[in-house]
Image: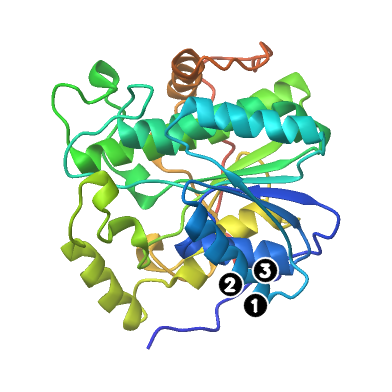
């Protein structure tokens, strides 16, 4: 049986505003519940309103008095991202925590967003870039912690610079890897640019390891009529305690987003064999996430593709400097 005793403490978030994408099921729903239980005023932007309402009901049944607000958001639409940004900017309340968690995984056939981008790149990466840019004044006002959820898939494959939109040779998993590598590079670059420009934001990245979620389940809306063989294997590994559960897989992002021991420019994930499960800990960034030049290139391309610019402050120093500070694996807080 999978262990249910792995956990970490979460500091009191009373009076703080947190925004979490992808909070209506799976790992995101666990994150939403934990943030609400810690007292955060939680904003849940969701694509599917019905699932969002069900998530709110589930959280409130377990966290009486939870402070929750539902907003529409389709990360595959830059217009939708802009609408949410405008709503929250209009409210004017600083944001203390932003967790970029939502994602889509391996549509069998190439699909595009309404803006014409490959679906995984557009949703997992560009949508979150546009959200951070749109909310930047509120993130700066709150001196926010921004955590971007990547994947162990970011330790494989590469960014397909010559065919970024996968128009010539679509490969579902390679395109997924690319989206997570890009988001990781962006999350680390955000921390550097914030430090250089005095934005007051700390940004880090996390990954959940391996756990059974709906990412690989049947998803007719992306052309997957049946669940994949992989999800059946992952369920079995989870039951044996080898892979994680949604509860344990949420812990690295929870640690990265809330712990006073977590820092900007760092990478967090499960610490057991292969980093597929176990307590969360700081880890050395994957090789594909270490290039300063790749991070700069992803940042500038993302600004161009989203049409949402950031301030022009840029990190100073040697262009060959490492993209992240050296990191060592550390045990999770007791």
Q: Residues within 10 Å of mark 3 (few under 14, many from 20)?
A: few
CB-based contact (under 8 Å), mark 2 and mark 1: yes
Residue 55 occupies quadrant: bottom right
Residue 63 occupies quadrant: bottom right
Q: Where in the figure is residue 50, as x and y percent of width and height?
A: 49, 58
Residue drawn at 66 percent across, 41 percent down: 264
Q: Residue furthest bottom?
A: 1
Residue 136 visible? yes
Query: Which residue bears the numbered disc 1?
Result: 61
Q: Which is closer to the viewer, label 3 or label 2? A: 2
Q: Residue furthest right?
A: 15
Q: Residues within 10 Å of mark 2 (few under 14, many from 20)?
A: some
* Apparent side of residue 47 relative to residue 200 in the rendered image (left or right): left
Query: Which residue bears the numbered disc 2?
Result: 58
Q: Where in the figure is residue 259, as x and y percent of width and height?
A: 71, 58
Q: CA distance from mark 2 to mark 1?
A: 5 Å
Q: Which is closer to the viewer, label 3 or label 1? A: 1
The disc placed on residue 239 is: none
Q: Secondary structure at mark 2?
A: helix
Query: Which residue bears the numbered disc 3?
Result: 333
Residue 289 visible? no
């Amino acid at each position: 049986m999978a262990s249910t005793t792995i956990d970490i403490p979460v500091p009191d978030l009373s009076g703080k505003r947190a925004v979490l994408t992808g909070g209506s099921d799976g790992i995101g729903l666990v994150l939403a519940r934990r943030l609400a239980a810690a007292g955060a005023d939680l904003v849940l932007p969701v694509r599917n309103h019905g699932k969002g309402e069900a998530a709110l009901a589930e959280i409130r049944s377990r966290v009486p008095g939870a402070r929750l607000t539902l907003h529409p958001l389709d990360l595959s639409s830059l217009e939708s991202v802009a609408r949410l940004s405008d709503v929250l900017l209009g409210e004017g309340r600083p944001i203390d925590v932003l967790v970029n968690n939502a994602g889509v995984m391996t549509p069998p056939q190439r699909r595009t967003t309404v803006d014409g981008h490959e679906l995984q790149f557009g949703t997992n990466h560009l949508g979150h870039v546009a959200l951070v840019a749109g909310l930047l004044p509120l993130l700066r006002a709150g001196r926010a912690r921004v955590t971007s959820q990547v994947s162990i898939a970011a330790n494989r494959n590469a960014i397909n610079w010559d065919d970024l939109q996968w128009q010539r040779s679509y490969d579902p998993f390679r395109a997924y890897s690319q989206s997570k590598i890009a988001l990781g590079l962006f999350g680390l670059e955000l921390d550097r640019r914030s430090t250089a420009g005095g934005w007051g934001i700390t940004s880090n990245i996390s990954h959940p390891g391996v756990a059974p979620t709906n990412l690989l389940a049947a998803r007719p809306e992306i052309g997957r009529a049946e669940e994949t063989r992989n999800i059946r294997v992952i369920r079995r590994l989870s039951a044996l305690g080898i892979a994680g559960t949604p509860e344990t897989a949420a812990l690295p992002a929870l640690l990265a987003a809330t712990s006073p021991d977590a820092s900007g420019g760092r990478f967090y994930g499960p610490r057991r064999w292969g980093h597929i499960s176990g307590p969360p800990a700081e880890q050395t960034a994957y090789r594909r996430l270490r290039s300063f030049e790749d991070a700069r290139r992803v940042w500038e391309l993302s600004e161009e593709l989203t049409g949402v610019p950031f301030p022009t402050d840029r990190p100073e120093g040697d262009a060959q400097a490492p993209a992240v500070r050296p990191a060592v694996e550390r045990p999770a807080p007791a």
